[in-house]
Amino acid sequence: MTVRSPGVRGRSGTPWLYLAPALVVLGGLLVYPVYQLGLISFLEYTQAQVSGGEPATFQGLGNYAELFGDGEFWRVLLATVVFAAACVLCTLAVGCALAVLLTRVRAVPRLALTLAALGAWATPAVTGSTVWLLLFDADFGPVNRVLGLGDHSWTYGRYSAFLLVLLEVVWCSFPFVMVTVYAGIRSVPAEILEAAALDGASQWRIWHSVLTPMLRPILVVVTIQSVIWDFKVFTQIYVMTNGGGIAGQNLVLNVYAYQKAFASSQYSLGSAIGVVMLLILLTVTLGYLRLLRRQGEEL
Amino acid sequence: MNLPRMRVRVRRPWRSAAEVSALIIAAVVAFPLYWMVLSAFKPAGEIESDQPRPWTLAPSADAFRRVFGQQEFGRYFLNSLLVAGTVVIASALIAFLAATAVTRFRFRFRTTLLIMFLVAQMVPVEALTIPLFFLMRDLGQLNTLGSLILPHIAFSLPFAIWMLRGFVKAVPEALEEAAYLDGASRARFLWRILFPLVFPGLVATSVFSFISTWNDFLFAKSFLISDTSQSTLPMALLVFYKPDDPDWGGVMAASTVMTIPVLVFFVLVQRRLVSGLGGAMKD
């Protein structure tokens, strides 16, 4: 990519002028809060400090030591990683499979599936959560009737509650993958696919050996986006398991941080959890950037 | 498109199987939404029955009446619209300028900035509720809609800039040169030529900021503590949802009301969204 239009040289102030609003907003409402998040995580910060009753005292790594010494934190961290990984895998599998399916059908089924997916995508997280709760409700839900499960409660057990949330998350996030990958497949020249089909390649073979390499940049973007979104799932867990499940069995880091800060006023512990999440996602980002660079894509 | 030619080669039984499964999957995916609307219209006795039926013979608007009868529900709706609308327009304009800067200029720290925009997307918004709460308090924005608008603009920007890059890049250089040769000023090129060309991309991008703002209930829950007249729809919905004894009819009616604007928005931009995502990802 070369950008050399007349007037660019000698006008080095212009890009900064264009960037100014974005930088002001991001600086004030993103960078500064992140800095404060880090700061609070090193302080003693509870209700007394919030109301100004006591000065905030520096704790060093005390909050982190407390956090890492707490078995619950490690349990929640493990649950978050496993849950996010399961969500990402299911979302990608469903999204890609349906994108391929879309290329195999005529206009009417394609429109039906696209519209249904857009509907799921458009559904607000709060709404989706309550609707899925009703569908799987022990007393009034249709799912238990159809499956003959009686009044089995899905939110009572730890794993069935996670499974229920996973279903909802996949339902509302596969459309993004499907639509994006479908758009990507459509941009692959038909001649290539025809040639592969003429050579007798199976569907799976075409997907694996022809489409995947060509769609690689799209798949990377979609995967990373899913990782970021699913690692930070908040609303679904909060609403569907009523703030983290029975005795906190369904907590993920995000909800855990929120509960620590706002339910038990331990703002510094909540902030420390936030910092840990930030660091984990940063690692993912760096891996993503290296992937992009290896592919030779220029930023 | 060249696809129709290719599809001829798919053997007939396979295609029928694919089409049948596509229709079944579409029905499954749409089912929760159908159940939501259905439950909103079911009379109270039917919804709380242990023999749920996928139809109702006596549709009733009682649940909707309860929802709209709730104190100032209309106001919550307007609040939500106002917040989402402001965020969509403001972040689209700001992101457009920023995306133009990082794609059509070469300057120092350009790559660093791009990486920063990418990294900014990783920030767990919910974790920032804590410092943002203190920031809003110090700015005197607690209990105002500003406490929702400002953070959401900031959180929409990085993804919007990142996505818009592709669209701005796709506008040929030659066009820019021609405009300058014809004596257009930089501002004129920006708003009269580049902006309309990038507009479909802006629409595709705005879907994301609209959804995340419209759906937000964490900020609303945390920043609008005492002044309920500033509340937004997700909060109003949760009034009906008490974990022990939810008013399912009310919840589903409120959910329906809350989902419709997003659906309308989606249907309106659907075309642009699909081509937009394809364009943005292709680079």
Image (cartoon, rainbow, N blue to C red):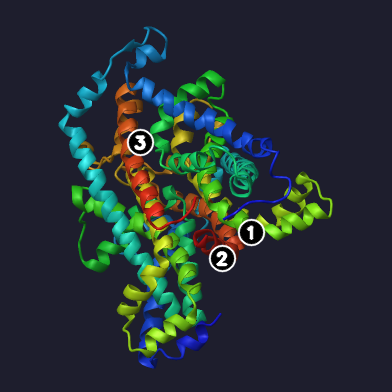
Residue A278's disc is 3
Q: Amino acid at mark 2?
A: Ser
User: Could you tell me how far apart the alpha carbons at marks 2 and 3 are, in whole angstroms?
Assistant: 32 Å
Q: Name which residue type carries label 1.
A: Pro
Q: Is residue A22 visible?
A: yes
User: What residue is rendered at 36% in x and 7% in y?
Assistant: A54
Q: Secondary structure at mark 2?
A: helix
Distance from the alpha carbon under mark 2 to that under mark 1? 9 Å
Q: Which quadrant of the figure contains the N terminus of chain A? A: bottom right
Q: Residue at the location (22% across, 44% down)?
A: A79
Q: Are marks 2 and 1 in contact (CB under 8 Å)?
A: yes
How far is mark 3 from mark 1, CA to CA? 33 Å
How would you rate the neighbour count of disc 3 (Cα within 10 Å): few for under 14, some for 14-19, many for 20 or more? many
Which picture quadrant has residue B168? bottom right
Say if B133 sits above or below A11 in the image: above
Q: Amino acid at mark 3?
A: Leu
Q: Which residue is mark 2?
A: B275
Q: Residue at x 49, y 77 (%)?
A: A189
Rendering coords of residue A9 (x, y %): 69, 42
The answer to whether marks 2 and 3 mark residues whose Cβ atoms lie closer than 8 Å is: no
Q: Residue furthest right?
A: B183
The chain to which mark 2 is attached is B
Q: Earlier in the sequence, mark 2 or mark 1?
A: 1
- Residue at left offset 63%, top offset 51%: A3
Chain under numbered label 3: A
Residue B54 visible in rendering: no
Q: Position of residue B88 (x, y in %)?
A: 60, 45
Are the residues under badges 2 and 3 in a single subunit? no
Q: As displayed, is residue B232 above or below residue B44?
A: above
Q: Which residue is mark 1?
A: B200
